[in-house]
Image (cartoon, rainbow, N blue to C red):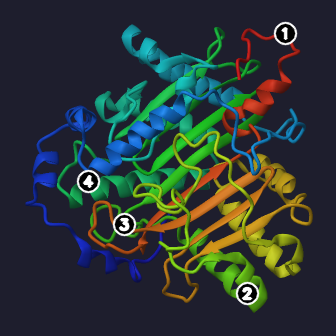
């Protein structure tokens, strides 16, 4: 994703002091040393506490995100979505041919392994599964990227590369490229005994700092959910990838939608006026997730509807909702994206909600969420993690997508396969 540099250099006034212990220590460590020190007790303590909470959440069997605690049945169907499954299987088989027996063993898990749920988006390598792209030969790394490229849309693949390159840029800014770099991402396969297959369900996870993609494939159908995409800063303003920028469309369209609403609709949509509002109940904000609710390890969270019903929007406003969701479905190839968007659109006049936290002037940072029985899309401006801005700023963005009611990881679709003759038993 490329744009002009525009206002992007604003983040430079918040560059950290690289002489403080956090960075002088980080600069001497590789990803494994960095994670080992963190897991001993961790700095910062709040993030270690969050990690312990995540591991506790992981002990609960998968249920799926819901709005009221009850998973709704019959929301998803098996269908032809035009995925180029032959090409995807071929690319994955080629990757496997390049791996040593030890690497093949490390990279493959059973499709029902709960380890699929242990992705995370901080720079800490909290769950070291599969192969890590910055630790393998370039041919192997290129083969992993070929799997991504064969699966994602061209524009979705460009977005993923943008997130990776921005992560590398951040590593250069803080002089810790062994922890944060363009290839500091793990790749893991989840499959049956058949391996990557044109006829059996399988999938993969690709995860690291600010980019986590979970992909389930069955014949010509795909689920890319949950995914997380973020950036700090969200624009590269120097170096070979100068001009790379991501997440600006999601930001622009969300603000445009909020500003287009009537005063009464804005009042309904704005559930909190402040980004860290005293009116928020305990747990509504935390250091890592800040305002978003459906991030790593939140597979079973109950997220009640908030805000204003999309049913009362004008056709122009509904089109803005569609345009936002098109950005959130960008990783899907065109045919699968249009099918998924059509499924989501069916709920606009029945059960779709838009909510907002913060103000909505042109320069304000904000959070928004679009939620229905078949999708949750979240957008959140964050305060600094590597940068020093104490208040949320437009150059640090987190976005994520979930498929509620057991849609994540293709679980609902796997449930539909229970009665068929398969080489696996769904333990969801």
Return the residue at label 2: 260
Q: State how far apart marks 2 and 3 are (Cα).
A: 28 Å
Q: State how far apart marks 3 and 4 are (Cα).
A: 11 Å
Residue in front for this viewpoint, 348 or 339: 348
Res 262 seen here:
no
Counting labels gives: 4
**Residue in the picture at 45% in, 41% down:** 120
Nearest to N terminus: mark 1 or mark 4 = 4
Q: Is residue 160 above or below residue 74?
A: below
Return the residue at label 3: 233
Nearest to N terminus: mark 3 or mark 4 = 4
Determine whether the residue tagged by mark 4 lies in a helix, strand or loop: helix
Q: Nearer the viewer, mark 2 or mark 3?
A: 2
**Residue in the picture at 81% in, 54% down:** 338
Q: State how far apart marks 1 and 2 are (Cα).
A: 51 Å
Nearest to N terminus: mark 1 or mark 2 = 2
Q: State how far apart marks 2 and 4 are (Cα).
A: 38 Å
Nearest to N terminus: mark 3 or mark 1 = 3
């Amino acid at each position: 994703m490329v744009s002009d540099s525009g206002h992007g250099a604003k983040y430079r006034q918040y560059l950290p002091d690289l002489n403080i212990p956090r960075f002088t220590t980080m600069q001497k460590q590789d990803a494994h040393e960095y994670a080992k020190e963190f897991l001993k007790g961790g700095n910062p303590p709040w993030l270690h506490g969050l990690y312990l909470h995540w591991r506790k959440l992981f002990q609960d069997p998968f249920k799926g995100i819901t709005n009221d605690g009850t998973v709704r049945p019959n929301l998803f169907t098996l269908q032809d979505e035009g995925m180029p499954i032959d090409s995807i299987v071929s690319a994955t088989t080629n990757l496997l041919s390049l791996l040593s027996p030890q690497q093949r063993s490390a990279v493959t898990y059973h499709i029902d392994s709960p380890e699929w749920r242990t992705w995370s988006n901080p720079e800490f390598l909290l769950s070291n599964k599969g192969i890590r792209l910055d630790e393998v030969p370039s041919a192997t790394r290129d083969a992993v990227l070929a799997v991504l490229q064969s699966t994602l849309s061209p524009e979705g693949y460009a977005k993923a590369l943008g997130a990776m390159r921005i992560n590398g840029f951040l590593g250069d800014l803080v002089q810790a490229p062994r922890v944060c770099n363009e290839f500091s991402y793990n790749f893991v396969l989840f499959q049956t005994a058949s391996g990557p297959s044109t006829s059996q369900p399988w999938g993969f996870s690709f995860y690291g700092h600010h980019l986590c993609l979970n992909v389930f494939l069955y014949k010509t159908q795909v689920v890319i959910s949950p995914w997380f995409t973020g950036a700090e800063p969200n624009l590269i303003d120097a170096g070979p990838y100068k001009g790379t920028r991501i997440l600006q469309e999601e930001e622009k369209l969300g603000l445009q939608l909020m500003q287009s609403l009537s005063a009464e609709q804005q009042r309904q949509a704005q559930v909190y006026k402040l980004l860290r509002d005293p009116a928020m109940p305990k747990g509504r904000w935390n250091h890592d997730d800040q305002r978003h609710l459906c991030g790593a390890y939140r597979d079973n969270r109950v997220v009640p509807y908030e805000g204003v019903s999309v049913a009362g929007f004008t056709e122009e406003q509904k089109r803005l909702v569609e345009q936002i969701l098109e950005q959130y479905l960008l990783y899907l190839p065109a045919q699968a994206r249009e099918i998924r968007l059509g499924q989501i659109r069916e709920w606009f006049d029945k059960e779709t909600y838009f909510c907002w936290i913060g103000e909505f002037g042109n320069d304000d940072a904000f959070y928004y969420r679009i939620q229905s029985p078949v999708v949750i899309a979240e957008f959140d401006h964050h305060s600094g993690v590597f940068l020093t801005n104490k208040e949320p700023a437009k150059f640090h963005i987190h976005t994520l997508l979930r498929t509620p009611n057991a849609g994540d990881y293709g679980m609902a679709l796997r449930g539909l396969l229970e009665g068929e003759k398969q080489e696996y038993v769904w333990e969801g």
